[in-house]
Amino acid sequence: MSALSGLKVLDLSRVLAGPWAGQMLADLGADVVKVERPEVGDDTRAWGPPYLRDAEGRDTSEAAYFLSANRNKRSITIDFTQPEGQQQVRELVAKADVLIENFKVGGLAAYGLDYASLQQLNPRLIYCSITGFGQTGPYAKRAGYDFMIQAMGGLMSVTGKAADEEGAGPVKVGVALTDILTGLYASNAVLAALNERERSGLGQYIDLALLDVQVACLGNQALNYLATGVAPQRLGNAHPNIVPYQDFPTADGDFILTVGNDGQFRRFCDVAGHPEWASDARFASNAQRVAHRAELIPLIRQATVFRTTAEWIAALEQAGVPCGPINDLAQVFADAQIQARGVQISLPHALSGEVALVANPIRLSRTPVEYRSAPPLLGEHSAEVLRDWLGSSTTR
């Protein structure tokens, strides 16, 4: 029995934030039904190349992007721009515990599928709306995409090389991080609402905005600003509050050094052959190292280039100083720790025989994540879902 066994989720969302939330609930055992447009489906089905390949190495119709966020779901196609489709969604809603959608503000009201309408049909329904800017405020009607929100929400102001370095300028994170974080917040909010429903017997509406999430996830950088009134600047791979905590060159590449306290710094200095740094008043405490960053970092760089990355990692791990290599994705999935943890999984797939996926990182001791099915083909489960939820296999 999975943690969320028996929970029924209707996923009307597309692209990434909503589907990521749906996949999280599905991994934990919920029956997540993905409602898609006939013939077209989720936008990300076409967001390729790359596409999943069949046994002969030929591209299939399934984009890798779609595969990343739709495991353990069942797909049904419904055209809810038509009255028959709207009625079918209502029938499914009557049986559902949760509905996830990411249409523009008011977008589903025209079809009678907004919260106010569906709450009357099912008072226990938890209705999660994900938009770029939320249901209120001057930007509420605007469309919002991850890249734009990374810019507007301040993330790109602290990501990229420092202003005095060649190639300086704003840089987005290499994955749609705001979408993924919003999906995680959404699944958390759904679980909180489900817990509250146990007491009240009532569902509720969840209003999640990508911009709100992005600002919330600025973490220490947001508080650096609020505490001082000074906007943090881009520092490349350096940390605004900890030194040394960045990349350094080696004899054959680069490595990451993450010194979190003064004891670790002393041990690093010993390994580096410069114990005098630890007793230098400019570098003895983290606060002083931050203040004298411009003096310390060049000294460390001059020392690190004389050993290989592997040599540094071996020596520093022995001394208890956190460090690591800078891996590409081939190196990530070949890493012994990643393999030992089972981070890569595979599931049977109708078009390719099997599909490689990334495991859910949640490890529950009694009700572990179950991998029941690969991301579905478009409309693959239409008749099955209608039979299971409504007792009829008739599609509309």
Image (cartoon, grey):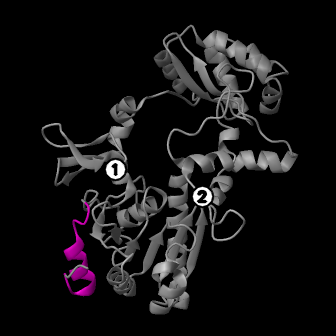
Identity of the residue furthest to the top in this view: 306
Q: Where is residue 160 in the image (x, y as percent from the top left)?
A: 64, 31
Q: Name the residue under label 2.
A: 210
Picture residue at 72% right of the left edge, 47% below the top = 220
Extent of the magenta region = 378-393
Q: Position of residue 383 (x, y in %)?
A: 20, 76
* Amino acid type at image mark 1: Ala
The answer to whether any part of residue 113 appears in the image is no
Magenta-span inclusion, residue 381: yes
Magenta-span inclusion, residue 386: yes
Name the quadrant containing residue 8: bottom left
**Front one among 112 and 377:** 112
Question: Which mark's residue is nearer the viewer, 1 or 2?
Answer: 1
Residue 126: numbered disc? none
Element type at marker 2?
Answer: helix
Identity of the residue furthest to the front in this view: 82
Picture residue at 70% right of the left edge, 20% below the top = 165
Residue 46: numbered disc? 1
Picture residue at 42% right of the left edge, 52% below the top = 361
Query: From the viewer's perspective, is 91 left or right of 201?
Result: left
Q: Position of residue 62 (x, y in %)?
A: 27, 50
Q: In this view, does 206 lie above or below 196?
A: above
Neighbour tally class for label 1: few under 14, some 14-19, many 20 plus, Cα within 10 Å: some
Identity of the residue furthest to the left in this view: 56
Query: From the viewer's perspective, is 59 left or right of 162?
Result: left
